[in-house]
Image: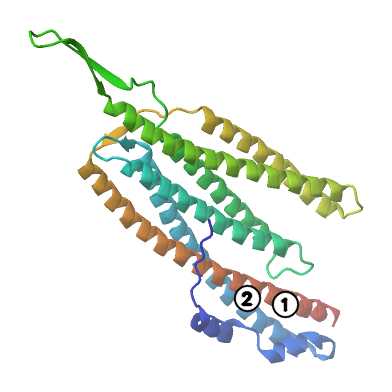
Amino acid sequence: MKDTHSYSLLGITLVLLALFAPAPAQTGAAEKAETLDTETLKRGIANLQAHADSRETRITELTNDIMTLDGRIETRVDKIVETLKGITDSDQSGTNVARTKADIIEGLKRSIEYYDTKRRGLKSETMKRAPKMTRDDLFSDIGVFDERIEKRIGQILELANSLHTHEDIDKWKYTYDDSWIGDGYSRTRNPEYYHNRKQTQGTEQTKGQLVEELNGSIDRIDSRNRDIRETLKKEITPQYREMLDTELEKNEGTIAARRSQIADLTLSKQGYAEPMGRTQMSRVEDLIEDMTKDLRRDFNALFENYAELNQERAGLKTIREQLTKYQGMLKEK
């Protein structure tokens, strides 16, 4: 379920570094601030503040762009899921609807893996003594990725629960011929029985795989919880203990949600859905293909902006640290 989206931002990055990075002389001065006079410190503070203001402006612009892209992405994904939930295959469409639902489920899984990769990178950064970004930014972003992952899981389950389920349909159709040439009852194959059987096989495979993946999620979270409990037995800082307690509580809630999702997958039955003819389904496929192209473009743009945003936030953190040091030295003058 891996999906990578990498685009070069070298040109933009070089420009941003040239425009907003503190000059080498200022960095060196921060290290030797003890030797600077009051006026030099004031000029350094003013210069650093100007750089910080520029970075904050760019961060606001990038954040707004990301929110706009994210809104478009969520609207399109919601539309695709809602459209597919309400339709089902007919004799004319064969298995086109079921196949399209399965394709979208796989796409949603890939997006979860991509979000999870980003989340794990952020989580690893929070464990560092001196992370590149502020811990508030890191934990805020982790929360956003968690929300998106849970939403995608919910959408996958909605699509899975809209797939064909077993129906009690007679395998044979019986007709009675009482004409003078008839000889009583005759038996013919019931096409609805074979259609439902074919659809149900695909449903069982899809749901079985999802149950397996949800159980795998429970196992991974259980393993993490065991590690947390072992760490809590040790001498650790109050802040770290609080963070682990919060994670443990959240993980227990996620495990409960996963078990509920497994039960729902196992017991749910398909509700009413509109059967699609061949021409109708062709139009739906064209619509989804167009929306998927738009989604891919916006998804790539969002993470390009997100990479740049993190660069800006890391740079701003460095500038603020230098600024704090300068201001402290000035107070001692």
Residue at the spot of label 1: 323
Q: Earlier in the sequence, mark 2 or mark 1?
A: 2
Can you tell which quarter of the image residue 14 is in? bottom right
Can you tell which quarter of the image residue 35 is in? bottom right
Q: Position of residue 111 (x, y in %)?
A: 51, 55
Q: Residue at x 64, y 76 (%)?
A: 315
As shown in the figure, which amino acid type bears the numbered disc 1?
A: Leu
Which residue is nearer to you in this view: 234 or 270? 270
Q: Residue at x 37, y 35 (%)?
A: 198
Q: Position of residue 262 (x, y in %)?
A: 58, 34
Q: Viewed as shown, does residue 239 lie left or right of 281?
A: right
Q: Secondary structure at mark 2?
A: helix
Q: Viewed as shown, does residue 325 lie left or right of 211?
A: right
Q: Quadrant of the C terminus?
A: bottom right
Q: For the view shown, which residue lies furthest in the right direction?
A: 235
Query: Is 313 located above or below residue 84 in the figure?
Result: below
As shown in the figure, which amino acid type bears the numbered disc 2?
A: Ala
Residue at the spot of label 2: 52
Q: Viewed as shown, does residue 221 lie left or right of 311?
A: right
Q: Residues within 10 Å of mark 2 (few under 14, many from 20)?
A: many
Q: Residues within 10 Å of mark 1 (few under 14, many from 20)?
A: many
Whether tag 2 and tag 1 are in contact, CB under 8 A, the answer is yes
Query: Is 32 located above or below residue 268 in the figure?
Result: below
Q: Residue at x 71, y 88 (%)?
A: 26
Residue 158: tell me if it is visible. Answer: no
The CA span between labels 2 and 1 is: 9 Å
